[in-house]
Image (spheres, helix red, strand yellow):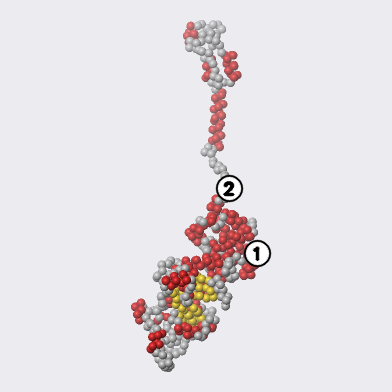
Amino acid sequence: MMALCVSSHYKNSPNDLQLLADAPAHHLFVLLGPVDESKNQLPDILCVVQVCLEGQISEKSAIRSLRDGHSPHGDQIPWKFCEQFRDLVFPTLSGARIVRIAVHPNAMKMGYGSAAVELLTRYFEGQLASISEGDDELDVEASPLKVTEAAKKASLLEEQIKPRANLPPLLVPLRDRRPERLHYLGVSFGLTLDLFRFWRKHKFAPFYISQIQSSVTGEHTCMLLKPLNNEEFEVSESDELGFFAPFYKDFRIRFSKLLSDKFKKMDYKLAMSVLNPKINFTEVDSSGSSANGYLKKLDSVFSPYDMERLRAYTDNLVDFNLVYDLCKTLAHHYFQEKLPVTLSYVQASVLLCLGLQESDFSTIERQMQLERGQIHSLLLKVGKKLYKYLNGIAASEIEATFPRLKERVLEPHNVSVDEDLREAAKQVEEQMRAKIELDPELLEQFAIGGKEAEALEKSKISSSGIISIETTKPEYKPKPSGFDKTAKKRGHDKYSSKSHKKRRA
């Protein structure tokens, strides 16, 4: 067992056996091969897992540590978590840090390390122990004697070294040992792509990556957590990270902002694994409430002129240099899952290198083994997808902000053209008919007075057929505005007469 531990890591040495014996918080779990209990021989050790119990720190100690800016030795994960998020509750929780996993050299790459981690998780979640709840008192171990008390009872000079009988077994099956009540499992290691992918496969999520590389290995220290099923927390069943979800979200935002500075030289594959972005979205995700809530504030992120530049780029009207400043903004919002657009892994990687790490094209060509033309082609596809989504949601709001000339709104007439023409023709006909018909006022000047009947009865008709009678009707005077001057002159000179003038019948 110790040989596996020593060969697995440069920090381990044979003297660690004494350190493990003197540290009650450290436990060793081994994954054994098939065991034949009828034979008196040691089983084959396939994997060794060293675990250190941490946590259960008083809140006063956490407050004092934050105030003094100094973290005590031990309890690496609780103190680092408290330092990063200024959280006073997490140090009071109980957890276990996986210090080392050592697999037999002849059993490498066979899945024994993954099996050991899965069994360890199930064990601390209480899925393997067969001890009933009523056996708690029987399972309590006797508390060890203090050093001073043990020194009074015995002395190394008086101890007799001889073979002992009835020794407890070296290894205890997990089903016979009650697990500690833990809230989480944690791990700390030098950040490499293979190691990180191994722990991410087992649903461990990062919360800390050191900004300074180790002077010995040149690696960044990375710490990950995996919440265990615990009834003390009220969390959503759909969220596998449980109480750790908001802290992980905050870590991703901070890490993405540091990619352009402290982690600029980090390999893009490792950066993509750390961020673990969601790049495949469904139509339900694209129309989700969270995305729409973000797009209500789109005008504060992208101006109408930014959208015009992006549109011109997607239409191949301008070069990428004109929209290079938008690449960083688009990348930050995309990797925060505020732009639910499906991208391929290569497209998302190019967006990360240019937008988050702010790498030049030469660096991207060297890391991704792509030609510059291929990189521009991938960027154009990314730009088209992002612009299509943004424009489809916020087009109306963006267009409303552009200055434009006032347009006249042409409304249709209530009367059709045919009806309007018929009405106009009717008016013209009435005017022409009124001109043709004789005006009664014009005929008034030819009227006979009130004694016509009497004159006709008394007078005799002459042989010429002309009768002369005296009129009592006053002289006709036409209205000034009723007729033209020619009619007035004609009526005065030709038809007017004095009161004694005779008219023809």
Task: Give whichever of 238, 361 is nearer the camera.
Answer: 361
Q: Which mark is residue 6?
A: none
Give percent across and percent down for residue 492: 58, 15
What residue appears at the point 52 percent right and 14 percent down from the top-left corner?
447
Does residue 183 show up? Answer: no
Nearest to viewer (mark 1 / mark 2): 2
Report crowding for label 1: few under 14, some 14 to 19, many 20 or more residues within 10 A (C-alpha).
few
Position of residue 349 relative to residue 101, above or below, is above
Q: Secondary structure at mark 2?
A: loop
Q: Which residue sits furthest front?
A: 68
From this view, report whether residue 366 is shown above or below residue 458: below
The x and y percentages for residue 20 are 47, 83
Element assignment for label 1: helix
Residue at 41% x, 77% y is 180
The x and y percentages for residue 405 are 58, 46
State which quarter of the image contains the C terminus. top right
Taking depth in this image into account, of 442 and 224 the one nearest to the observer is: 224
Q: Which is nearer the eye, 169 or 115? A: 169
The spot of residue 14 in percent (x, y) is 51, 85
Quadrant of res 376 = bottom right
For the image, the number of numbered tags is: 2
According to the picture, the residue beneath numbered tag 2 turns out to be 404
Q: Is residue 491 above or below residue 430?
A: above
| Residue in front for this viewpoint, 271 or 482 | 271
Answer few, some or many: residues within 10 Å of disc 2's Cα (few below 14, many 20 plus, some between 14 and 19): few
| Location of residue 149 by image quarter | bottom left
Q: Are marks 1 and 2 in contact (CB under 8 Å)?
A: no
Describe residue 171's horizontal placement relative to residue 389 as left or right. Answer: left
Q: How far apart are labels 1 and 2 at the CA level? A: 39 Å
Q: Could you tell me the amino acid type at mark 2? A: Arg
- Name the residue beneath numbered marker 1: 373
